[in-house]
Amino acid sequence: MTEVATASAAATGIAMATEKAAKELSPEEERVLIRDIALTAEANTKEGDSFFLITQKWWQHWIDYVNQDQQPNNSNNNEGSSSLSGNSDSNGVGISKRPSGIDNSDLISDGPAEDANSDDGVEIHDTLLEGRDYVLLPQQVWNLLFSWYGGGPALSRKVINSGLSQTEFAVEVYPLRLQLLVTPKGDRSTIRISKKETIGELHRRACEIFHLNLEQVCIWDYYGHRKHALMNDMDKTLDDANIQMDQDILVEVLNNVNDTLVTDGTSITDNGFADKEATSVLLEPSKSSLSIAGGLSANKIASKGYSAEQLQNQTLGCPNKESDNHFGNSGVSTRGTFGGLTGLLNLGNTCFMNSAIQCLVHTPEFARYFREDYHQEINWQNPLGMVGELALAFGELLRKLWAPGRTPVAPRPFKAKLARFAPQFSGYNQHDSQELLAFLLDGLHEDLNRVKHKPYVNSRDADGRPDEEVADEYWANHIARNDSIIVDVCQGQYKSTLVCPVCNKVSVTFDPFMYLSLPLQFATTRSMTITIFTCDGSALPSTCTITVPKQGRYRDLIQAVSNACSLKQTEEIKLVEIRNHLIHRFLDDSFVSLSTIKDDDHLAAYKIQKSATGNLLLQLIHRRQEQETSDAQRWKPFGTPLISSLLCDDVIRSGVIQTIVQTMLTPLLKEGIEYSDDSDPSTSGMARDPSDHGSGEVDTNCASTSINKVLPKLPLQLVDESKTCIDLSAGDEKAINLSAMSHVVVYLDWTSKLLEKFNINYLENLPEVFKYGPITKKARTEPLSLYTCLEAFLREEPLVPEDMWYCPQCKEQRQASKKLDLWRLPEVLVIHLKRFSYSRSMKHKVETFVNFPIHDFDLTNYVADKRSSCSQLYELYALTNHYGGMGSGHYTAHIKLLDENKWYNFDDSHISPINEEDVKSPAAYVLFYRRAKSDTSGTSSAGSRRARDKTSYKY
């Protein structure tokens, strides 16, 4: 009832005001009347209503005029608006003159109207901003002001559903501007049409403009001069069809209604358009300072949830205050809000791309650069780049995201370019946002590299020269070949020190970096589970879990295992990796890094007698029959191989090998198993010491439970160097020539009868090095400092075998120790938290909560170059988040709008404000920091010259 009464009063006021000349109304009466009408109109706004643009300059003049009676006697109230003020009284208080007629000429584009069929026939400038250039007024307010003051022209815009919910509306200040191209005639026309209009309405208007028959015309989504889709769903809106601002629509005239439609993506030239100007759009960006993405005004109209009482409490405030240009929080904001709050539509698992793009486009240096005329810096000939196309696609996408309007943008053209130059990101699978970010930064750098002809440079080793001299030389050489906005903003330099483990040669180089990938480590140790086997039959296999340094080497692991199994002085450990029931490799190089051992590897350690020079290793491989087809069986490896030492005689008897194998298997023999009829009693014996080689002496070290066991003859086959199988069960005296063998491989074929005599479970259950279990709450919430991650990254560690270093002094490939130090930090520091670990068969995500600073991230103590006078304090302004598991996760971004000093969550097309304390979470993945500015900060080299110029970017 209150809303009805208010509306009725407002209608009565309008009628009385129109009958009464404006000159008969006082400023106070105008203010109150406009306020009441505006509040009522906004509270009842619905889709299809009209709002009118009015120049900000005239509106501010009227605000000053109607509020002058409420101003206190303080001349400062008119500060900043003297051009709109009239004479001053004797007390110095400004008196605003009554505005003259409404003049919207400064909003009107100088050129002719692009769409002669549009409602008003007038085009406004592409770069207008609400609150700066214009305000939006409900139709009733415009009608009243126009009746009082006259002028114009009237610039009407419709209210449309924003698509975010059914209760929110927005004013479509910039309807879609589309280029209609007719084939085969070659005619063209530009039209304006709401994105909420249907394809059927676009089809009708196209036929009306070109005087065509509806039945003989079909229209195509012709984005980028390619036939993307036939637009034949007449009830579908242009918004749902993903039609973009300033794109082409192909109007195809069929000579016969039954003509076959061509869908091969033929270019416009092939369809009869030989037009250079049209194709040039694909090569160069717009030369205006902004490219309009089109769509909604920044205003959103909440049509529900506000009472009339709340609306009555709103008023037109005093001038020169933030509230001057508001009709109320419930209605259209005529002051405007900060830009940069435009989402990206998810095209299908593209959240990884959307989150990375939002962080880059909200980097102030990039926002300023790509909104200016950057095409002069595009390197069209760089063979390492993408002929400028990636930079153009990214620049146009950035401009759309910063243009007026908050309608989510579909990054379809950008994704198409991305798939063309980086096929790994094609399709609609989930990908790693950090990998995409790395590609984008590198690709944009090459496309925008100011160096057109890269000179040859030869970077020398330090050879004892001062670090400062060598670092500056390396940086100068780098800048001579790489000079772009990406280098200016994102590239730093670190010092790399390599030390040869053999000759102690020290090599120092200074390399550039684009981002830092920091490991997530709690401690410096690592737990590893290994199964230990004995070769003398003295004990069953057993597992032990030992602790080793994370950055240790194989020698640390061998020593830890030796201590765990009480190794005797006469024994040694052979450490191997088991894969597919075979020995994949021996871990016998003391200097190899433990990082080469993955958590899902299977390791076995063998206690054997220390071998004299020339001793061989005997490898026992277990096999059993498995059914391959209905009538065929095959012997396949199973279980864990066993190892024993073997004296390297030129000739050995088969019976000796039988004895060695029997000894190794003694602990596995089941209790109560005696001599079997299928073995030869003359060749069967008790377990013997394999080092005895058939001497007949019983190994007194054997387990007491095995002393009286009689072992059957085993079906053994030895494979020599020529891959020939030698049957070792035919007799004990058969001579085997070992002189040409580097190792002895024996296969034991386990028959069903033999399997009944032994407990082979000990051979089959070989555990992983580290078994991942469910992530506990404690593991997720245990804090880890970002500084700790950085220190782990900078810690000295051995190179992996795949990255062996060629020592110039040894003239050999060496597994050197490497130490990194930060030397030169960029203006924008990108930090990647390595949450994902990969192995051959599994992928793991670390859910560790990293406590990263939002303010005052101090890197002063981590920079080795003490000459730098730059501030080493950084402020967080953006980050990407990853939620969920490896294959089904979801990416979002948290971004701080610096001009607004507020944090927002960017979740694809949905954007919502968040509190600063909610920015930190275990999902944080890639962090974006900007150098904190100070009056005394400077730079230390010519390589940062452009970074100095761009530190004051505002957006």
Image: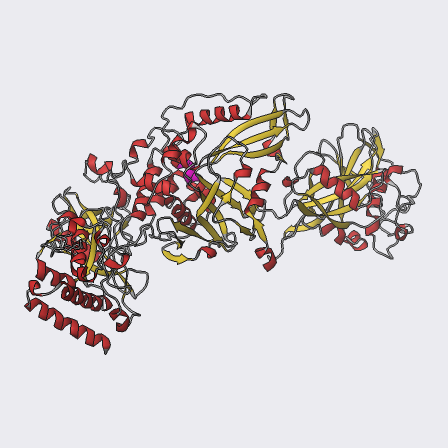
Q: Position of residue 497 (x, y in %)?
A: 59, 30
Q: Position of residue 754 (x, y in %)?
A: 79, 51
Q: Position of residue 171 (x, y in %)?
A: 23, 58
Q: Nearer the viewer, residue 716 or 218?
A: 218
Main SS of the magenta part reads: helix
Q: Quadrant of the N terminus?
A: bottom left
Residue 486 vertical position relative to residue 188 in the rendered view, above or below: above
Residue 596 vertical position relative to residue 629 in the rendered view, above or below: above
The residue range painted magenta reads 439-443
Q: Residue at x 38, y 42 (%)?
A: 418
What colour scheme governs how the chains and residues are painted in the rendered image of this protein? Answer: secondary structure
Based on the displayed image, in which of its 4 quarters is residue 154 positioned? bottom left
Residue 193 vertical position relative to residue 596 in the rendered view, above or below: below
Q: Residue at x 50, y 22 (%)?
A: 459
Is residue 821 one of those drawn in magenta? no
Based on the displayed image, in which of its 4 quarters is residue 461 positioned? top right
Is residue 440 one of those drawn in magenta? yes
**Mark count:** 0
Residue farthest to the bottom? 1
Q: Nearer the viewer, residue 213 or 260?
A: 213
Residue farthest to the right? 697
Residue 738 seen by the camera: yes
| Residue 399 placement, left or right of 578 | left
Q: Nearer the viewer, residue 875 or 755?
A: 875
Q: Position of residue 943 (x, y in %)?
A: 42, 29
Residue 741 vertical position relative to residue 748 in the rendered view, above or below: above
Residue 393 seen by the camera: no
Q: Quadrant of the C terminus?
A: top left
| Residue 814 placement, left or right of 570 | left
